[in-house]
Image (tube, grey):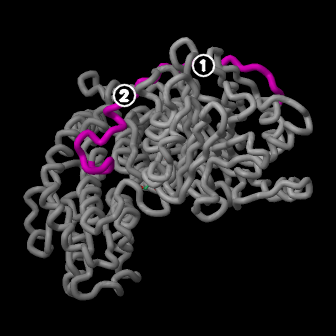
Amino acid sequence: MCGITGYIGSRDAYPIVIKGLQRLEYRGYDSAGIMVYDGEKANVFKTKGKVADLEAIVTEANKKGTISIGHTRWATHGVPNDVNSHPHVSNSGNLTIVHNGIIENYDKIKKELVTRGYIFHSDTDSEVLVNLIEEVQKQEKCKLAKAVQLALNDVVGAYAIAVFDINDPKKIIAAKLGSPLAIGIGENNEEFFIASDASPFIEYTKNAIYLEDEELAVIKIGKEVEVRKVHDDSAVNPEVHALDLDLSQIEKEGFDHFMLKEIYEQPKAIKDTYRGRLLPNEGIIRMAGVEEYIERFKSADRIIIIACGTSWHAGLVAEYLFEDIARIPVEVEYASEFRYRNPIITERDVVIAISQSGETADSLAAIKMAKANGAYVFGVCNVVGSSIARESHSGAYTHAGPEIGVASTKAFTTQITLLTLIALKLGKEKGKISNSDFHAYLQNMELIPSKVEKLLEQDAKIKEIAAGFLETPSCLFLGRGYNFPVALEGALKLKEISYIHAEGYPAAEMKHGPIALIEDGYPVIVIAINKGHYDKVVSNIQEIKSRKGKIIAIVTEGDVIVKEMADHVIEIPEVDEALSPLLTTIPLQLLSYHVAVLRGCNVDQPRNLAKSVTVE
Ligand code: F6R
């Protein structure tokens, strides 16, 4: 949560940092702030609200300067207000900090600093950190980098920081533990960019260093970035990565919202996920990350899947896939529960961690715990080089491209694509799937992108259905088998962006409680495709109908039975049950999107949420 960015060089820093903050707003958007150094003074502006609110308060005269740091916040300590916004300035006024993360022992440090005369204006842990650095600087009479290093050794928690000292204005000190931090390197080291991810600087440079945990960087104009370990000050030789991100991937390109763009990107994203892996002509699935550890997979007593939110729903789909196709027992765990409930983990367990961002704090902690207990960890991430990807023994990227809308869409379908490939590969390796079924799946997988394209053509019809949800306070999503997790995901999507209460349920469970909600006109979205337990779902629909509920059904093309009962139907192309979540998900995403837009909600930045949940 929170995004930080900075610039040091010879260009006007303000527009670069503001644009960078806009690109990082997906990480949090409670408040925003900026410091611009004008050659004499460090001018700080900050406000509750979004980056656009910040732009409105920065005076023209204070936009001048070639050094700047900025922050967009998702509040952890202290309510989102002007004072708690970053940057924070030390008591002397010399040091300015932007911080993404949490300092857990800030209260103790704050009390100590108060006894030494420090005054605090905000409720934040970050203001404590900048004053701790100042105090160390004073005590040790050292340069900023040393003071930051010593101070960080005293803190417990997570951080990605950029610190500027008005008395040493040719450099910025950056450091990271837990939260991500990238440094973009300009030509001849004449300028540098600092950011929570590379998106703020991709039009300026393709060369970036991703700091590792406990690393501190001295970023000085005209010099190579000097990286040292925080705990022992030892020198590190950082790897310079070539970025393969381009501007179009992080812009809306004519779509009203990132979420809509990302929904429409799914045919391509799914293809990108299986490209080079799914080889129907050769009759194989190639996945280096699985092949390298194939014996661990084959001899696993069980697979434990850990994830949060939408990724957890993808994990639930994978449970059906792995058990059905590869006959391996699977447990799917919320990372936050798993890490705190003393689970039994053995060396014969394979843990699959699923995370779009690769930075989710609970998932990361769960992986570390599984590794410490001898399990082999396979990471399924979208963000290349992310913490979870690095922490896993092996893994595979989904290659969905940047997902900027806070509500996850293409990340979900590409995670399912990847997990389907793994299930098929393991099913084949373990002899649990016949050759003919395996080949049929390979071929049918290849047809999925064109079927998704076809489904997207129903957008206008789904928008009409969405109009019926304007005044809806609550609704149910039902599905069975492979489509039960899709029902959960449909409900999550609707509630997070439109603020309509929604619950996902296995259709058969409705009788055990939720049916009490059904009354005249109560909307129930039912996934009723012609595979799996179609007849049983039809009975569930009848039960809703007899209580005058309103049915919106996702059916297979050509369906006649459900069509007669439902108020609205959305047809999906014919598909294997195991592959059906890749299609049934699409109309639910579009439905949520249109409902949210019609209700005037901020689709890409729903209230209280952030894209990357780096705090537990
Ligand atoms: C919902 C959503 C969240 C994330 C969850 C896990 O639309 O985006 O529920 O799925 O925060 O995030 P990752 O996948 O980055 O670990």
| Total count of labels | 2
Which span of residues is magenta-colored?
232-260
Kindly identify the residue that appears in the image at 28 percent across and 22 percent down: 282
Q: Left or right of 548: which side holds 371?
A: right
Report whether the residue tagged 2 is closer than 8 Å to ligand 1. Answer: no
76 in the magenta segment: no
- Residue 340, image x, y percentages: 68, 58
Q: Nearer the viewer, mark 1 or mark 2?
A: 2
- Residue 64, image x, y percentages: 52, 35
Could you tell which of marks 1 and 2 lies nearer the N-terminus?
1
Say which residue label 1 marks. 239
**Cα gap from disc 1 to disc 2, whole angstroms:** 21 Å
249 in the magenta segment: yes
Quarter assignment of residue 232: top right
Give the numbered dot on residue 246: 2
User: Which residue occupies the foreground of this view, 328 or 40?
Assistant: 40
